[in-house]
Image (tube, grey):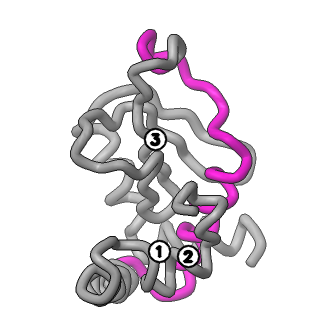
Amino acid sequence: MNDSKRHRLNNLNLSTFLGLLISKIIGGTTIQLNNGIYINYGRKGKYNKAWAITIGDVILAKQDRHCNKCKSGTPHDLADRILRHELKHSEQFAKFGGIIFLALYSFATIKSFIIYRNHWQGNIYEIQAGLQDGGYI
């Protein structure tokens, strides 16, 4: 899927709007890349081990307490593999629609947790996005 189509579909299904709203709520710095993806550097907390969470065209990147750029609030590039993984999730939002994809992803997460005791190993959407790129294996 090309960037323009993905971006247009995620705007239409309101998932990018939701991602930007969450970005505003959590604070931090948000930048937009040339491909229409927004990256917010404001996610905190040790409750979630994922480096990033994507909603529509918005990547909510975790602040790394060991990273001087994260500590200062300075935006910086995510690792190519993580960006590639999160871009796949953005395409999944565009393909399935915002709310529908959230429901599908939630169901796949619950199923994976029941079978494997983690959210990713049996989650078809994480597998399609690339478990290695996402840092799961």
Tell me the element at label 2: helix
Can you give x and y, in whole percent of width and height, for residue 70 in the image? 47, 20
Tell me the element at label 1: helix
Asked whether the beta carbons under mark 1 and mark 2 sit within 8 Å of each other, the answer is yes
Mark 2 and mark 3: Cα distance apart in space:
22 Å
Which span is picked out in magenta?
70-98
Relative to 36, 13 lies left or right: left
Task: Tell which of 114 and 4 is nearer to you.
Answer: 114
Residue topped by disc 2? 9
Residue topped by disc 3? 61
Residue topped by disc 1? 12
The residue lying at 42 percent from left, 46 percent from top is 60
| Main secondary-structure element of the magenta-colored stretch | helix
Q: Which amino acid does label 3 sit on?
A: Ala
Asked whether the beta carbons under mark 3 and mark 1 sit within 8 Å of each other, the answer is no
Dot 3, how many residues are within 10 Å of its Cα: few (below 14), some (14-19), or many (20+)?
A: many
The residue lying at 34 percent from left, 72 percent from top is 119
Q: What residue type is labelled 1?
A: Leu
